[in-house]
Image: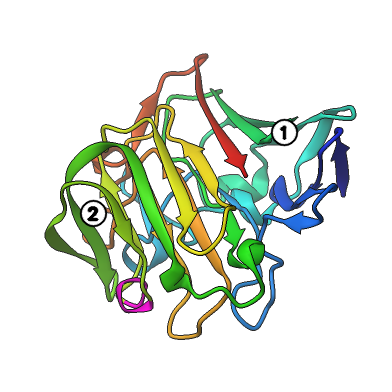
Amino acid sequence: MIFLQNETFSMEISTLGAEPQSLKNTKSNLEYIWNGNKEYWFRHAPLLFPMTGPTKDNMISVEDTLYPMPNNGFARDLEFTVLEHDDTHAVFMLSDSAKTRSMYPFGFTLTVTYTLLADGYTAKAEIFAKDDLYFTFGWHPAFNLDINGEGTPLEQYYVCFEQKEQVDRNYPSNGVFITEKNFLDAKDFFDLSRSETAKGPIILENLKSPKVTLRCKTGDHGVTVTRGDMATFVIWTCAPKQAQYLCLEPMRSFGDTTRPLELKKMKEAEFLEKGTTRVFENSFFVF
């Protein structure tokens, strides 16, 4: 476990998946990251690579050869090497191996940098292609709904945007997207409810707002996420069990099981030329 600390916050990051486990305001003692209670969801804030979302039968195809691909990729379940570490930042790296090539036959390095800020943290991912490759990427942090008091209902929270948005909502049913037209109809917020999250993830594409914020009607604490260079934003919590967390997930893309198995034919997959690097950087501000 890697520990970061500044005057206001402490942060714990596991080398398994380079996954944040804790973000705590040491002055107020508020914990912002979900505790990973296995009764509901054992993860905290995984990163998703080289796949986001499910594929048919958890498989992909590369040049007509089939490979097993876990839902949301494999990086979150592999050990990263720590390259650098000081009080307020840490750098982790995952490189291709025989194990990764059995699922994803490309050479790559994934370098992840976390920087602790005065009001949250920044996460940066750098994907370097040793071969021509196709990939998707996303962050999947779960935030603690108890920051406004233990047991604060999800219905007391709402999601707001910097601009009025006109977007549909996708959610998967048995792995296939259902589209809810005009989910945001010239609105700059929506109220959260268990009935909505019970349908599945709230998947929003091509928002105009650079930032998305979780706020509470009955408390002062919340989270703001920068979208950066991410076309997709996903909001999710488990169902039917009702856990005290909400995931706010900037993603490069998110697909369903109807997409082609052939990786290069997936519209969600981005091409990266050998010898080049793709960078994603997002900030997670808490208050």
Residue farthest left in this picture = 181
Q: Position of residue 188 (x, y in %)?
A: 26, 44
The residue tagged with tag 2: helix, strand or loop? loop
| Region rendered in magenta | 194-198
Q: Quadrant of the C terminus?
A: top right
Identified at 58% across, 30% down, the residue is: 108
Residue 93's mark? 1
Identified at 46% across, 71% down, the residue is: 154
Q: Position of residue 112 (x, y in %)?
A: 66, 32
Mark 2 near mark 1, Cβ–Cβ under 8 Å?
A: no
Mark 2 belongs to which amino acid? Arg
Q: Is residue 26 left or right of residue 62?
A: right
Q: Mark 2, residues whose alpha carbon is within 10 Å: few (<14), some, or many (≥20)?
A: some
Q: First in sequence, mark 2 or 1: give its number.
A: 1
Q: Position of residue 258 (x, y in %)?
A: 21, 60
* Residue identified by numbered label 2: 259
Predominant secondary structure, magenta span: helix
Q: Is residue 14 left or right of residue 59?
A: right
Indicate yes or no whether the magenta region holds residue 196. Answer: yes
Residue farthest top in this picture = 275
Q: Is residue 221 left or right of residue 264?
A: right
Mark 1 belongs to which amino acid? Met
Identified at 44% across, 80% down, the residue is: 239
The residue tagged with tag 1: helix, strand or loop? strand
